[in-house]
Amino acid sequence: MSKHQHQHQHQHLQVVPARYPARTAGAIVALFILAGVVQSVAFNPRWEWSVFARWFFDPVILHGLGQTLLLTLLGTLFSLFLGGLLALARLSSSWLLSTLAWCYIWLFRSLPLIVVLIILYNFSYLYDTLSVGIPFTGLSWGAYQTINVLGQFQAAVIGLTLVQAAYSAEIIRGGILGVDHGQVEAASALGLSATRRTFRIILPQALRAIIPTAFNEIISLAKGTSVVYVLAMPELFYTIQMIYNRNQEVIPLLMVGAAWYLIITTVLSVIQYNAERWMARSVTREPQPSRWRQWRNRATPLHPTEEISHVRSH
């Protein structure tokens, strides 16, 4: 092909933006469905939004919300700590530690949370006292009445911790196993101790895999605190139950609870998103663009030479 013909063909090339008709049609259908849902919920008087507004910031509801947040915080801290120890035990070269950790994880992943909570709440029926000492001997350093030690709040925190730690252990173990074994060998070649290898080399790299799944478990824990109602503990869901059993305003009060749970999970999701962006900087060397920036970049038309486009010849 001659140079003149090549230039002539190049002049007839037109750059056009990519079009996605299926995506546009799907967005229109989704907006149509969303509009129908909003209309049916906002303008149906049976939802009783005035009752919802009256109870949303009620002190009794806020007290129950505080108990839910406290259970979530303590359950998260204790379960991550215990789960980390269990994960290290599972990865240990000690056959005894690995087996005991596996048995713990197997047991508490098999038991429903509600069963664990009820057993702990009735622990005083099984054991009148709790003592600290050496098994199979009469040596004891202290004994306490079970009913005085294991109340509603303590049983709830321990039950949530025991069950959640089993899942946290597998999440942490999976993150550690995802680290390239060459990193461990390099750290060993430098003479680092096992403790320093774990906390300075392995765990910082494993966090990239641990954080997304761990936050999903934290969100599940926040919603799972509603199961504590079986202990008659005044957390958010139990408080709402007691109120609507008294005034029979079931739907608006359930919507109050749903709204607060949505707020809790939204805040946790925002924290997760920012934590993932912060962790991604160690890989990409620059922060990932936010959702708003991504949307703005898509909405702002680019120069034709910068667009990802189809090239069509006329």
Image: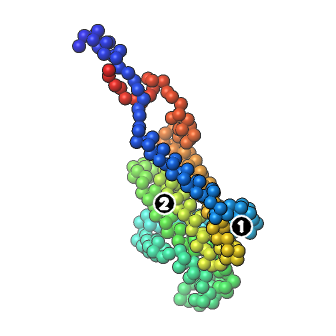
Above or below — where is 306 with respect to 227? Answer: above
In the rendered image, residue 95, in percent from the top left (x then y), is placed at: 40, 71
Q: Is residue 84 visible?
A: no
Q: Which mark is residue 172?
A: 2
Between 289 and 95, which is closer to the camera in this rendering?
Answer: 289
Circle 2 crowding by C-alpha within 10 Å: few under 14, some 14–19, many from 20: many
Mark 2 vs 1, N-terminal side: 1
Q: Residue at x 32, y 22 (%)?
A: 313
Q: Residue at x 58, y 57 (%)?
A: 40
Above or below — where is 260 with respect to 249? Answer: above
Q: Residue at x 48, y 44 (%)?
A: 28
Which residue does the numbered mark 1 point to in the structure image?
61
Q: Secondary structure at mark 2?
A: helix
- What's under tag 2, amino acid-wise? Ile
Circle 1 crowding by C-alpha within 10 Å: few under 14, some 14–19, many from 20: many
In the rendered image, residue 6, in percent from the top left (x then y), is placed at: 29, 14
Is residue 215 left or right of 178 when viewed as pictured?
Answer: right
Is residue 219 left or right of 4 when viewed as pictured?
Answer: right
Q: Which mark is residue 136?
A: none
Q: Residue at x 54, y 45 (%)?
A: 277
Q: Secondary structure at mark 1?
A: helix
In the rendered image, residue 140, in percent from the top left (x then y), is placed at: 62, 86
- What's under tag 1, amino acid-wise? Ile
